[in-house]
Image: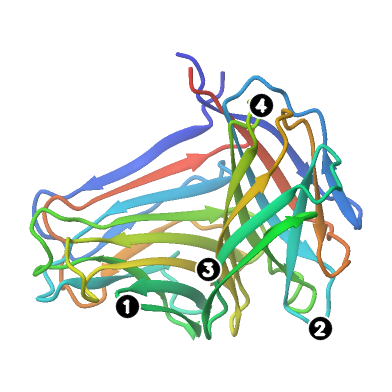
Amino acid sequence: MANTYVALAKTVLTGTQATVTFSSIASTYTDLILVISARTDYASTRDNIFVTVNGSATGYSETYLYGYNPTAASAALSSQTKWSKIYCNAATSTSNTFSNDELYFSNYSGSTYKTMSGSDAVEGNITTSGTIIAATADLWQNTSAISSITLTPETGPNFVSGSSFYLYGIKNS
Amino acid sequence: MPATYEPIATYTVGTAVASYTVNSIPATYTDLRVVINAHSALTPSQDSLWSIKFNGDTGNNYSTTLIRGNGTAASSLAQSSTAPARIGWALTDGAGASYYGSIILDIFSYAGATYKTYLSNNAADWNGGGYVSRIVGLWRSTSAITSFTLTDNNAANISVGTTITLYGIKAA
C-alpha cells in the first residue's frame, strides 16, 4: 500500500545553527507539513522565524491572528521578502522549552499561488508577552512548485541545540 | 504495517457549480481529514465564506464558534441552531485566478453514534487582506457522515480548479 504521510527529511540540532534549509523537495506529493520545535539564542523570551521558499525574496504576505496575555489581535503584512510571523522560544524563556509550530503547505507543487497555514505555540509558564499562540494565513505569489524551504531566526542569530525540524510529504493517492 | 492515514479520494471541480457534494464516504475510519484548496467566482470581494452540510441535512442542526483575524482585528463569533455550518474563507475571482484559500477540516468520530464535531484550520491571504480562522462546528446528528456538501455563502459558484481531498485516519 502506498505511503500517504511520508517523512522526507529532518534537522535536529546538537549545536547552534543560523539557518535550516530543506532542499531538493520532490514535487511528487500533494501537500507538505513542516513541524518545528525551536528555540533561539536571542536574549529575550520570544523570537520569530523567517521562512522563505525557493530562495525567493519576493511575493510573500500574511494575515495573522495572535494572542498573548492580555492581548488578542490580528494584523497583516503585504509584499514582503519573507514570512515572518512564525514564533519560537528564545534564550531567556523558561529553560528546556521549545516552540510548537506546524506549517501546512497545500498544493505546494501545483500551478497556483502557494498558500501556507501556520499554527504556532510558544509557552513558558509565564503570563507576559513572552508566550504567544498564533495562527497565520500565508501566501507566496508564485506559481512555481516549492522545492526548498529555508528558516532563519529573526534576531537569534542562531537556533540552539535541541531544536528540531521535520518535513513530511502528504500524498493524495 | 496497517495504514493509519489513507487517501480516500480527491475531487477536482471541472465545471463551476453552485455547490459541490462528496458522496459515499466509507464508515471504516476513525476520523476524516478534508483538505480543500478553495476558490469561488465572487467579485469584487477577494474572499468568501464557505459552509458545509452533512448527509443532505438542511435542518437547523448545526452550530459553530470561530475565532478569526482579518488583518485588522481579532474577533470571535458563534452561531447556534443554524444551517449550514461555516468552515472558513475561500479566495475568489476578485483576488485573481491563482489565489486559493486553504481549508483543512478534521472531523472526529465521523462514523460514531454521537453528535459530530469538526475543527477547521483556514488560511486565506490575498496580499493586502484576507482571513485566518479556526472554527469548531457541531452537527447534532448521531448518524454516520456519508456525504457532505460545500457552498459559498455569497451564492457564488465554486470555481474550476478547486480541489477536495479526503483522508481517512484509522485508530487501529
**Residue depicted at 91% across the width and 58% down the height:** B18
Disc on the earlier residue, 2 or 4: 2
Q: Nearer the viewer, residue A112 or B52?
A: B52
Protein chain holding label 4: B
Q: Please name which of the two marks, 2 or 1, marks the residue nearer to the observer.
A: 1
Q: CA distance from mark 1 to mark 4?
A: 39 Å
Protein chain holding label 1: A
Q: Are marks 1 and 4 in contact (CB under 8 Å)?
A: no
> Which residue is under mark 3?
A137
> Which residue is under mark 2?
B44
> Measured from the top left, where is residue A12 in percent x and y?
20, 46
Q: Are marks 4 and 3 in contact (CB under 8 Å)?
A: no
> Which residue is under mark 1?
A70
Helix, strand or loop under label 1: loop
Q: Is residue A76 left or right of residue B118?
A: left
Q: Is residue A3 above or below residue B129?
A: above
Helix, strand or loop under label 4: loop
Q: Is residue A75 left or right of residue B147?
A: left
Q: Quadrant of the N terminus of chain B?
A: top left
> Measured from the top left, where is residue B131 in percent x and y?
59, 72
Q: Nearer the viewer, residue A139 or B144?
A: B144
In which quadrant of the rendered view does residue A108 lie? bottom right
> Which residue is under mark 4?
B111
Q: Nearer the viewer, residue B38 or A10?
A: B38
Q: Amino acid at mark 2?
A: Pro
Q: Which numbered dot is residue B153? A: none
Q: Please name which of the two marks, 1 or 4, marks the residue nearer to the observer.
A: 1
Helix, strand or loop under label 3: strand
Q: CA distance from mark 2 to mark 3?
A: 21 Å
